[in-house]
Image: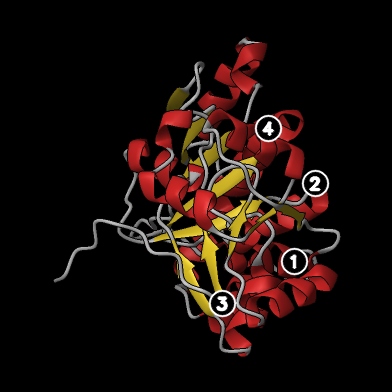
């Protein structure tokens, strides 16, 4: 396999350039060479990128490309690329397009036959996953959960029985609500790792069953500050466990039918054991009586 030890900038090429998520030392030599050599840098926030370039004494033309203007400005950038210019795409931090703008531009470039060159580099989701101690051979990146409770619970319910490790981003002001909803929808025993301020001064990585993690976060306000990644253990059904959808069906049918009939119909609908459903319902009824 041929290895390249230098960077040659090509005309009519879009470069996807990751930038540090905290520690400036994480920028690669190749990224610096590309940023210093292209004709134009398309940036999510030109002021933010300007400060980064200043740190490395790079003078470059900047072009604003963010969530609110990307679909319109992508055409302008495409024309520049077709005219022979080279362009680097950067976001405020990390790898562009990973929860950041850039998709529409890359899609238009590929449709138009413009070369797109991705550079490897920082990504908070991957960095957190690598240190979480959860299975990393198969995982699902889910980005930010919805802001409102109903949407968040719906989203969590949709992945409650996903066997792969789940990766979420979360904000400071919604962390407690999201963890509480995880307890409700995934169960308090589901193991979750909170990776906070990755590569920065106050970096913290803490894992626990989500009910315990929620209590731990509540103990100290500082534990919910900064930029956060939640790594959630995938669903691992026990031999006798019942699918969540089957339990919801059983609960609905019990309101209208005798328990035995409700269990029989639920078993037929979902292909699970009638006796297991019946036993589960009886245990729930006993628990309600004790309460």
First in residue order: circle 3 vs circle 4: 3
Q: Which residue is mark 4?
A: 175
Q: Which mark is residue 147?
A: 2
First in residue order: circle 1 vs circle 3: 3
Looking at the picture, tell me which residue is in the foreground, 283 or 30: 30
Element type where label 3 sits in the image: loop
First in residue order: circle 1 vs circle 4: 4
Looking at the picture, tell me which residue is in the foreground, 98 or 12: 12
Is residue 70 at least partly visible in the picture?
Answer: yes
Element type where label 4 sits in the image: helix
State the residue at coordinates (38%, 59%): 240
First in residue order: circle 2 vs circle 1: 2
Q: Which residue is mark 3?
A: 12
Q: Which residue is mark 1?
A: 252
Quadrant hosting residue 255 = bottom right
First in residue order: circle 3 vs circle 2: 3
């Amino acid at each position: 396999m041929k290895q390249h030890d230098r960077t040659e900038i090509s005309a009519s090429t879009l470069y996807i350039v990751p930038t540090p998520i905290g520690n400036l030392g994480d920028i690669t030599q190749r990224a610096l060479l590309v940023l210093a050599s292209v004709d134009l840098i398309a940036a999510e926030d030109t002021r933010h990128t300007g400060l980064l370039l200043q740190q490395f004494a790079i003078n470059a033309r900047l072009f604003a490309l963010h969530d609110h203007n990307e679909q319109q400005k992508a055409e302008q950038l495409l024309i520049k690329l077709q005219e022979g210019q080279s362009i680097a795409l950067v976001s405020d931090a990390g790898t562009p397009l990973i929860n950041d703008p850039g998709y529409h531009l890359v899609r238009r470039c590929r449709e138009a036959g413009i070369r797109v060159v991705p550079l490897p580099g920082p990504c908070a989701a991957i960095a957190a996953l690598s240190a979480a101690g959860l299975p990393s051979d198969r995982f699902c990146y889910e980005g930010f959960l919805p802001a409102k409770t109903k949407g968040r619970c719906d989203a969590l319910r949709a992945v409650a029985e996903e066997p792969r490790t789940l990766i979420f981003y979360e904000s400071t002001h919604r962390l407690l609500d999201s963890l509480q909803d995880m307890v409700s929808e995934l169960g308090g025993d589901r193991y979750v790792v909170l990776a906070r301020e990755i590569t920065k001064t106050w970096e913290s990585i803490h894992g626990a069953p989500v009910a315990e993690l929620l209590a731990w976060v509540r103990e100290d306000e500082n534990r919910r500050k900064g930029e956060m990644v939640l790594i959630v253990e995938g669903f691992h059904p026990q031999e006798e466990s019942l699918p969540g959808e089957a339990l919801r069906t059983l609960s609905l049918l019990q309101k209208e039918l005798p328990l035995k009939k409700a269990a029989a119909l639920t078993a037929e609908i979902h292909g699970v054991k009638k006796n297991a459903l019946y036993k589960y319902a009886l245990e729930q009824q006993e628990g309600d009586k004790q309460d």
